[in-house]
Image: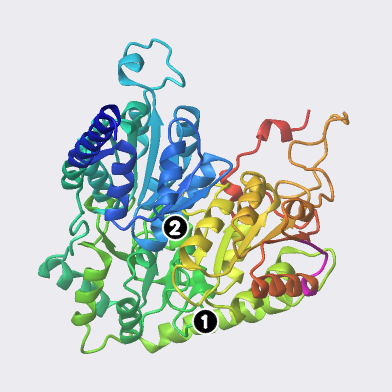
């Protein structure tokens, strides 16, 4: 061997030794992924782009499920409902500025609904943003997010990623759950540090939702009210479903014998067909009950704020309320027995408190049962209709059969008439299977919810959509097809908003703002992306199409033709939609 060759070989060996001795490195990209995985967050709902594209590629390479959407609001809605279903924060990742703003609507909605969610957005560099020097997509995202979520944090240094992610997780799930914003400037991702030190900087969140029991005095006060009640009622809200205290809740209801109402996303905590269910006698029990116990339900607009004609004579009832947020008490009316604590813990102590039994007066139970049976019998012929074009009752009657035959299927529901009527018509049998618009009553959640429901549960999903509601997120049918998710979308197509019969009062060429292209074929959209499209005109066809879709698991869209005149203005909340009295006055 020549001297030169020997020198080269020696130098290569020295360089190899230096490489072997060099400390292993990590960076911001890897630390974000490691921090999430350490805390058992393995699904991400995202829209890729600057500066998070490589982060998403790396996350998928690390075994995380990265579901890429066509619009950030839909990805955010998916993350929000994932939080409701799992009690872990659903994570949405977006690009900066406009992407962040698109996700912010979902974050605010999650906070209002008490769903744990984290919106992670890339952002521009602080130095340029703070001096307003015009960076790419420059925006002070943290300041914008703060008023609309439960908490907001920014991470500037790689060594703080672990603690920053931990703070976001704890904030999202502790106390009353909600949305959290996490701001990650682009410069953070490329920061490099020693891998061993990086690993030490990660934080596993411990006991973020400790049991919180009410005082013995508070429990006794509530029990005394229940024991003295002549016409008691329990109302379950989605907070009760979120608590996953299903066995305790059922035991309390059945041991107490009290009739119950379930708000829409609480449906299925106990089957809607349970003998104590007062769902079909809602108006009667709200008016006539003398003691009402609220479990994870708020006296907001959905319950007429606990007052007015919905609730009978003023001062005719006393309220018990279970909520982890003390400020929720007395928000609209006096709460006579507040129970501040987590629902699982409170229901546990209440169950022990009625060990001797708590039987409401038999005449109250008989009155509720008689009204329920009367209303069920009155509704039955409407649900049996096989008219073509369909009305809402006939179409929902067909879907009611589908869910009865598949009680473990997920039901997503949004719209106006489509939502309002489905709440009362489609019985649910298992908890956390019905996902809908929740507290704000917003449209546009449907496709995001449907994707997350399929990803998180692994169950078939039936998404029942008004044609207007579908329009907010309809492009996500491509996402459903791309990931081959077992989602069947049924669009109640009545050619417009509320009804498809409005006309332009001027007689001009433009259509009314309330109508869509008549006789649209939404099923063709699904076929364009490789899914199954079906066009149906009567309830029998609808039942067969949905049954086949749910059995096959193939992405399917059913265009269900509804009589354009079948709807009512604003669904069941027409009183919230003011109309001009001046316009109606004679000239």
Q: Which mark is residue 273?
A: 1
The quadrant of the image that shows the N terminus is top left
Q: Residue at label 2?
A: 303
The quadrant of the image that shows the C terminus is top right
Which element type, helix, strand or loop, lies under badge 2? Answer: helix
Pointer 1 or 2: first along the chain:
1
- On the image, which quarter does residue 354 sit in? bottom left
Q: Which mark is residue 152?
A: none
Q: Residue 139 placed where, x, y %?
A: 41, 22
Seen in the picture, residue 450 relative to 193 is either above or below; the reply is below
Q: Is residue 364 rendered to the left or right of residue 498?
A: left
Q: Is residue 535 magenta?
A: yes
Using the rendered image of the protein, determine whether residue 304 is visible from the camera's viewpoint.
no
Q: Residue 180 placed where, x, y %?
A: 33, 42
- On the image, which quarter does residue 406 sit in? bottom right
Using the rendered image of the protein, determine whether residue 512 is visible from the camera's viewpoint.
yes
- Observer-nearest of 83 and 376: 83
Q: Bounds of the magenta span?
A: 533-540
Q: Residue 75 placed where, x, y %?
A: 50, 46
Q: Is residue 357 magenta?
A: no
Q: Nearer the viewer, mark 1 or mark 2?
A: 1
Which residue appears at 69% of the width and 75% of the height? 547
């Amino acid at each position: 061997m020549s001297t030169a060759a020997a020198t080269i070989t020696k130098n290569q060996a020295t360089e190899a030794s230096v490489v072997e001795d060099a400390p292993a490195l990590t960076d911001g990209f890897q630390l974000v992924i490691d921090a999430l995985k350490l805390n058992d967050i393995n699904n991400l709902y995202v829209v890729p782009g600057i500066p998070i594209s490589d982060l998403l590629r790396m996350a998928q390479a690390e075994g995380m499920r990265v579901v890429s959407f066509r619009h950030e609001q839909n990805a955010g809605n998916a993350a929000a409902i994932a939080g409701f279903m799992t009690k872990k924060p659903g994570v949405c990742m977006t690009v900066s500025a406009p992407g962040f703003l698109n996700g912010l609507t979902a974050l605010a909605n999650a906070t209002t609904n008490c769903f744990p969610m984290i919106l992670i957005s890339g952002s521009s560099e602080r130095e340029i943003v703070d001096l307003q020097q015009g960076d790419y997509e420059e925006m002070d995202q943290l300041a914008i997010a703060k008023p609309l979520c439960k908490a907001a944090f920014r991470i500037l240094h790689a060594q703080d990623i672990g603690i920053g992610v931990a703070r976001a997780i704890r904030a999202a799930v502790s106390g009353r759950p909600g949305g959290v914003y996490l701001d990650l400037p682009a410069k953070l991702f490329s920061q490099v540090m020693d891998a061993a030190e990086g690993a030490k900087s990660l934080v596993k969140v411990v006991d973020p939702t400790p049991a919180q029991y009410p005082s013995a005095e508070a429990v006794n006060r509530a029990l005394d009210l229940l024991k003295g009640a002549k016409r008691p009622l329990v109302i379950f809200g989605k907070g009760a479903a979120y608590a996953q205290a299903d066995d305790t809740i059922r035991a309390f209801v059945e041991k107490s014998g009290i009739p119950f109402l379930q708000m829409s996303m609480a449906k299925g905590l106990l089957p809607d067909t349970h003998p104590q269910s007062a769902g079909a006698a809602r108006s009667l029990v709200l008016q006539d009950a003398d003691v009402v116990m609220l479990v994870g339900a708020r006296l907001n607009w959905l319950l007429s704020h606990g007052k007015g004609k919905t609730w009978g004579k003023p001062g005719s009832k006393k309220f018990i309320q279970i909520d982890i947020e003390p400020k929720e008490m007395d928000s609209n009316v006096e709460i006579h027995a507040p129970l501040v604590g987590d629902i699982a813990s409170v229901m546990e102590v209440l169950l022990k408190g009625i060990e001797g039994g708590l039987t409401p007066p038999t005449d109250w139970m008989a009155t509720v049962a008689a009204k329920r049976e009367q209303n069920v019998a009155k509704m039955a012929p409407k649900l049996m209709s096989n008219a073509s074009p369909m009305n809402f009752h006939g179409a929902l009657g067909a879907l009611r059969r589908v869910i009865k035959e598949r009680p473990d299927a997920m039901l997503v529901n949004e719209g106006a008439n489509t939502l309002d009527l489905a709440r009362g018509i489609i019985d649910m049998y298992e908890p956390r299977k019905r996902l809908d618009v929740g507290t704000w009553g917003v449209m546009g959640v449907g496709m995001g919810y449907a994707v997350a429901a399929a990803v998180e549960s692994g169950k078939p999903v039936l998404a029942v959509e008004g044609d207007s509601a579908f329009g907010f997120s309809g492009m996500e049918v491509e996402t459903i097809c791309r990931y081959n998710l077992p989602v069947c979308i049924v669009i109640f197509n009545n050619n417009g908003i509320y009804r498809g019969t409005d006309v332009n009062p001027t007689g001009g060429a433009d259509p009314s703002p309330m109508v869509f292209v008549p006789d649209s074929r939404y099923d063709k959209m699904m076929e364009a992306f490789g899914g199954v499209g079906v066009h149906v005109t009567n309830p029998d066809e609808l039942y067969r199409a949905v049954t086949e879709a749910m059995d096959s698991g193939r992405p399917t869209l059913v265009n269900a033709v509804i009589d354009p005149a079948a709807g009512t203005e604003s669904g069941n909340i027409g009183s919230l939609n003011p109309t001009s009295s001046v316009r109606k006055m004679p000239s």
